[in-house]
Amino acid sequence: MLILMLQTEVLRKLSMMHRYVISTGGGAVVRPINWKYMQQGISVRLDVPVEALAQRITAVGTDSRPLLHYEEGDAYTKTFMRLSALFKERSEAYANANVKVSLENMAAKLGSRDESDLSPTAIAMEALEQIKGFLMGEDGC
């Protein structure tokens, strides 16, 4: 609970600042008070397929992720199952984002089925395009 309170306090302080990009953990969206602070700016959801997240996290290890750290068994399967459950729990909250950047859609437009082919620069450029659309009144989600 202390971590959640600290996270909210940090968001509160950051919401008073301007021209910053703030990356939260996936759990930040579950507390309604956090949305109060996040809505002081433009919120962007990076929508990554659960399979891709599970592969990426399994490749680097789950030790630094308390909600995904497991004792034994197939790390990918356990990570995939836990991420799927977390996504289901949080999907309604994730929908509050002003814009959504779908890595799956981006990869498909490039003729690829692998989101890992996308560069951070390409993802950032897509986020900027989605933000522009949001600011111009287009539907970004």
Image (cartoon, rainbow, N blue to C red):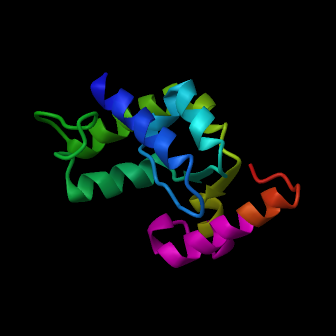
Magenta span contains residue 98 = no
Image vertical order of residue 6 relative to residue 115, above or below: above
**Residue 33 vs residue 139, the one in the foreground:** 33
Q: Residue at x 35, y 34 (%)?
A: 6
- Where residue 33 sits, quadrant-wise, is top right
Q: Quadrant of the N terminus?
A: top left
Horizontal and vertical percent position of residue 98: 71, 47
Residue 84 in view (yes/no): no
Horizontal and vertical percent position of residue 85: 43, 28
Segment colored magenta: 108-130
Image vertical order of residue 117 relative to residue 48, above or below: below
Magenta span contains residue 113 = yes
Q: In the displayed image of the protein, which residue is found farthest to the left?
A: 71
**Residue 93 vs residue 82, the one in the foreground:** 93
* 138 sits to left or right of 141: right
- Where residue 59 sits, quadrant-wise, is bottom left
Residue 93 in view (yes/no): yes
Q: Residue at x 43, y 31 (%)?
A: 86
